[in-house]
Image (tube, grey):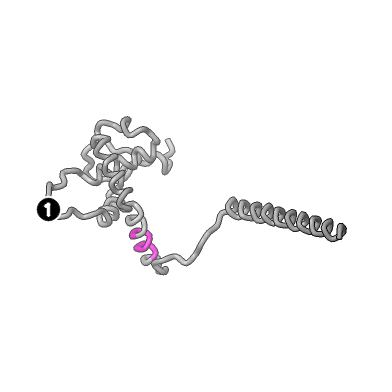
Amino acid sequence: MIDSPMTRLPEIANPSRKPYPSDLSDAEWEILKQVLPKPKGFGHPVEVNFREILNGIFYVQRTGCQWEMMPHDLPPYSTVYHYFQKWQRKGIWQQMHDQIREKLRTQLGRDEQSSVAIADSQSVKTTEKRGRSTGSMVAKRLRDVSATSLSMHKGC
């Protein structure tokens, strides 16, 4: 059997359960745990395993299943979904992405902030089409105005 990247199991030193291909490897977890929000230090202590929360989110993302259809050996779907929504609402996903991207760009010897912008061909085509149609409408209105003003001058 060929081990493709889509079916490869992550490298986990001491798994507490049989891993899924969507699970975080130890190396990935080391990176992500540094950018996760830290506990506030007061109130009820956090009793969830954030690695397993992320594994649940990535399972749903990778498989496309409904939250309620998550496997039972992952945390309860309601807990996983709660953190997914909370982190989305607070912009944590974007912050995590930005921090990891900046760190990687620094490691690669690049500027932390990219100065490149990309426009896909669909956006350009749509803009060009709208530009032509808008230009055509303006030209038609100008012809109509010219025709109206010519007919008014003929009548004088």
Residue 18 is situated, as x and y percent measured from the top left of the image, at 27, 36
Q: Amino acid at mark 1?
A: Phe
Q: Main secondary structure of the magenta part?
A: helix
Q: Magenta segment, which residues?
A: 99-105
Q: Is residue 153 above or below residue 75?
A: below
Q: Quadrant of the N terminus?
A: top left
**Image quadrant assignment for residue 15:** top left
Q: Quadrant of residue 142?
A: bottom right
Label 1 element class = loop
- Residue 37 falls in image quadrant: bottom left
Residue lying at 33% horizontally and 60% vertically, measured from the top left: 99
| Residue of label 1 | 42
Frontmost residue, 20 versus 121: 121
Question: What residue is at 25 percent from the left and 46 percent from the top?
Answer: 51
Look at the picture and state if 126 lies above or below 55.
Answer: below
Residue 24 placement (x, y as % from top left): 30, 46
x, y percentage for residue 81?
29, 39
Q: Which quarter of the figure is the C terminus placed in?
A: bottom right
On screen, residue 150 versus residue 27, left or right, reads: right
